[in-house]
Structure formats: structure tokens, C-alpha cells
């Protein structure tokens, strides 16, 4: 755009007979700009009338739709087109974009729980080096909502048995049990969550009854309900596993984790409450419920049918049981250490250590003594002539 100084020079050069294209080259503008300025006789005013938008007549309707909770731009576009809008979806999205900051529900009010009321539980995973090999490590983080003191435990799996074990270890680390445990919707805790209907895993309810805590599940797809604990998953990843990138064994990993918790995590100043976690926990600890008198058995629980040869099938291999149980159903428990226990009518009848699939059947000789006794007796003896006759016929 030409300034007043540019127009004064332009007019002076034109009066001296300089060609318009040369004036344009000297001023750095297009020759048509020079021509229009000379025809106008004055410098440009620098203002342009505002250009209208095809969206303008529909802005009130858009604002009303947003107020009614309709934020989907495609839905709004279809409503406007039905009302005669012929513009593009781009200018519609550009109009809506800055208003999204005002959308109801976007802000979350932080809810602080009283001491000993709630513990939040969640799983995370990371790849690190264990025993010299890159290994996927699953770790469960259990955090007390009031004090922000948390415990985490690492394992090779994040199944139900490890979930229950991780919770129990957290209770033992805190020296007590909160009134309520808030979990995500993993199958270890929640079998179904549809609206207000929640069906909890029976074993999780059994664990809750054993330790005396109430169970609560987050609404699906609402991670903010359990935000404190999910932030701790990231905290463990970016602090503990960055500081300690390799471990000689799983045992060393979990030992190092508890040492780090006591020396680092418990001593940090929590940024929300602006207080040292250990000091805040000191006020919470006396209000926790006492631990159960006996430790809950987290072993895998299932039933197996005893085959005719007095074996049961477990994880790709076969294990012997006493012969008098042939044809019956038995209860098996598998500990996290791979220790297999077999029960019949609440009576422990066999124990084994789980073996690899290709290691062969696992047999205890005494289990089959009765079977051998049943087939023992005189053995028929045949003369060799019998076999010679068969050979001649062949």
C-alpha cells in the first residue's frame, strides 16, 4: 500500500514526465497501483470496508447450538445447511475453535479425600534391562489419595493374581488398609461396567472382604477420576526407571524400588498440597484400618478333572495326583513362584513345581502305587512256537 510520502513522490515524478512503469519500479509497486493513484488524485486512505462472511447470518444459531451442548462441527454444519448455509466447513470450525475453551466440563475440579479414605490403583509398563536382557516390566502403582504416599511393585504380568499381590504389598508397605480402593476397569477387578451397572470380579470382592475395604470403579473413558495415580505412573517411569536403567534380577528390581520409595518418593514435596509426603502420611497412618490377621492367598485358582491315568493337565504339561482321585474334580492353586498345589475336599493332596511344556510329565511314584497294584498278578507266558506259527502265516 502506498503511503502519503510515496504518493507525493509518485506525483512529482509523473509531473516531470517519468513513465508509470519506471515510477512503479522505483517505489516497488505494480504499475496499476501507480495508475489508480494518479486517477484517484490522492493517497490511499488505508482502510477497507469489512468483508462479509457467509457465516454471519448463522452465528446466532451456532451460539445457541453450542449453548445446548452441541459441539460437533459436522452436526452443526448439517443444521446450518438445512437452514440455507452455503459456506464451507473451514470457516465454521475456525469460528467454533476459540469457543471450545469455554466448553462446559472441560475443567476438572480437584477433589481432595479425607485421610485413610481412598487408595487409587493402576498399572503401567516399560521396557528395561533385567538380567542382561531387554524386558517388558509391568508395575502396579497404589497411591493413598490424601497423603500421596504410593507404593509400586514390578512383575512380568499384570493379571489378576499380580494385581491382588500388588495391592497386598501396598497395604503392608503402608502398614494399614484404606476404607476404599478405586480401580480402573481391568478384568482383575471389574467384569462389566455399563452405565450405573458394575459387576466386580468375585475374587476381587473376596480380597476386599478379607481386608475390609470397599470397592469402586472409575467410569469408563474418564481417566481424570483416577488422575492422582495415573500421574504417579508417569512419575515412576521418568524418575525411577531413568535413574536405574538396569537390574540383575526381578528381586533386585523390587528391592531397589522400595529403597527408592523410602529415600526419594516419600521425601518429596508434593506440589499440590505443598507438603512433604512422609509428614502428611504421618497424620494419615493412624486412621488406616489394621492389616488382616492372615495374608490373602493370591495364587491362581481353578478346577481340573483327574484323567483315567491319574494326571491333571496344567499349562501345557501333566502332573500326577493320587490314584484314588481318578474321575474326580480337584482344585488347583498356582502361586506366583510357580508352586502348584492340588486340593480335594479342602485337603492338600499333591504339590509340584511347574515345569516347561517340553520337560515331560511330572510324576510322583507314590501317586500311582494303587494303579500298579490293581494290574499286578501272574503274567501269561507263551511258548516261542506261537510266534513261529504267526511268522509262517505271514
Image (cartoon, rainbow, N blue to C red):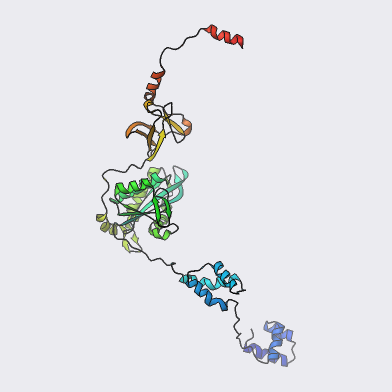
Residue at 34% from the left image edge and 61% from the top image edge? 270
Q: Position of residue 162 (x, y in %)?
A: 39, 45
- 140 with respect to 61 (left or right): left
Q: Is residue 264 among what the camera can see? A: no
Rendered position, 47 above or below 271: below
Tally the numbered discs. Answer: 0
Q: Quadrant of the N terminus?
A: bottom right
Rendered position, 295 above or below 101: above
Q: Position of residue 58 (x, y in %)?
A: 56, 76
- 125 with respect to 298 (left or right): right
Q: Position of residue 250 (x, y in %)?
A: 40, 43
Residue at 42% from the left image edge and 18% from the top image edge? 375
Q: Quadrant of the C terminus?
A: top right
In depth, the one of 267 and 99 nearer the eye is 99
Rendered position, 81 above or below 115: below
In depth, the one of 333 and 17 nearer the eye is 333
In depth, the one of 108 and 16 nearer the eye is 108
User: Residue most toward the left?
Assistant: 286
Q: Is residue 282 among what the camera can see? A: yes
Q: Quadrant of residue 318?
A: top left
Rendered position, 236 above or below 76: above
- 185 with respect to 284 (left or right): right
Q: Position of residue 182 (x, y in %)?
A: 36, 55
Q: Quadrant of residue 90?
A: bottom right
Amino acid at each position: 500500500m502506498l503511503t502519503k510520502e510515496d504518493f507525493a513522490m509518485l506525483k512529482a515524478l509523473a509531473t516531470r514526465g517519468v513513465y508509470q512503469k519506471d515510477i512503479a519500479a522505483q517505489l516497488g509497486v505494480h504499475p496499476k497501483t501507480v495508475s489508480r493513484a494518479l486517477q484517484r488524485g490522492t493517497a490511499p486512505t488505508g482502510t477497507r470496508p469489512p468483508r462479509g462472511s457467509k457465516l454471519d447470518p448463522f452465528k446466532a444459531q451456532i451460539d445457541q447450538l453450542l449453548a445446548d451442548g452441541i459441539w460437533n462441527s459436522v452436526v452443526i454444519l448439517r443444521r446450518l445447511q438445512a437452514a440455507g448455509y452455503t459456506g464451507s466447513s473451514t470457516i465454521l470450525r475456525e469460528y467454533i475453535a476459540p469457543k471450545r475453551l469455554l466448553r462446559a466440563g472441560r475443567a476438572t475440579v480437584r477433589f481432595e479425600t479425607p485421610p485413610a479414605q481412598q487408595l487409587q490403583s493402576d498399572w503401567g509398563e516399560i521396557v528395561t534391562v533385567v538380567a542382561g536382557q531387554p524386558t517388558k516390566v509391568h508395575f502396579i502403582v497404589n497411591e493413598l489419595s490424601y497423603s500421596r504416599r504410593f507404593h509400586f511393585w514390578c512383575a512380568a504380568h499384570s493379571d489378576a493374581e499380580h494385581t491382588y499381590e500388588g495391592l497386598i504389598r501396598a497395604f503392608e508397605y503402608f502398614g494399614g488398609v484404606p476404607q476404599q480402593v478405586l480401580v480402573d476397569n481391568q478384568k482383575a477387578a471389574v467384569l462389566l461396567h455399563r452405565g450405573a451397572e458394575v459387576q466386580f470380579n468375585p475374587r476381587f470382592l473376596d480380597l476386599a472382604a478379607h481386608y475390609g475395604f470397599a470397592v469402586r470403579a472409575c467410569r469408563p473413558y474418564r481417566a481424570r477420576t483416577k488422575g492422582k495415580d495415573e500421574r504417579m505412573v508417569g512419575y515412576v517411569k521418568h524418575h525411577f526407571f531413568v535413574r536405574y536403567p538396569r537390574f540383575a534380577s526381578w528381586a533386585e528390581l523390587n528391592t531397589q524400588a522400595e529403597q527408592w520409595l523410602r529415600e526419594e518418593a516419600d521425601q518429596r514435596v508434593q506440589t499440590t498440597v505443598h507438603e512433604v509426603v512422609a509428614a502428611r502420611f504421618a497424620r494419615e497412618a493412624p486412621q488406616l484400618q489394621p492389616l488382616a490377621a492372615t495374608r490373602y492367598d493370591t495364587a491362581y485358582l481353578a478346577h481340573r478333572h483327574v484323567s483315567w491315568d491319574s494326571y491333571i493337565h496344567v499349562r501345557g504339561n501333566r502332573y500326577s495326583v493320587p490314584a484314588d482321585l481318578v474321575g474326580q474334580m480337584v482344585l488347583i492353586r498356582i502361586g506366583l513362584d510357580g508352586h502348584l498345589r492340588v486340593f480335594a475336599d479342602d485337603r492338600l493332596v499333591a504339590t509340584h513345581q511347574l515345569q516347561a511344556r517340553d520337560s515331560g510329565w511330572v510324576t510322583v511314584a507314590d501317586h500311582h502305587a494303587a494303579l500298579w497294584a490293581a494290574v499286578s498278578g501272574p503274567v501269561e507266558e507263551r511258548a516261542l512256537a506261537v510266534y513261529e506259527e504267526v511268522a509262517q502265516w505271514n
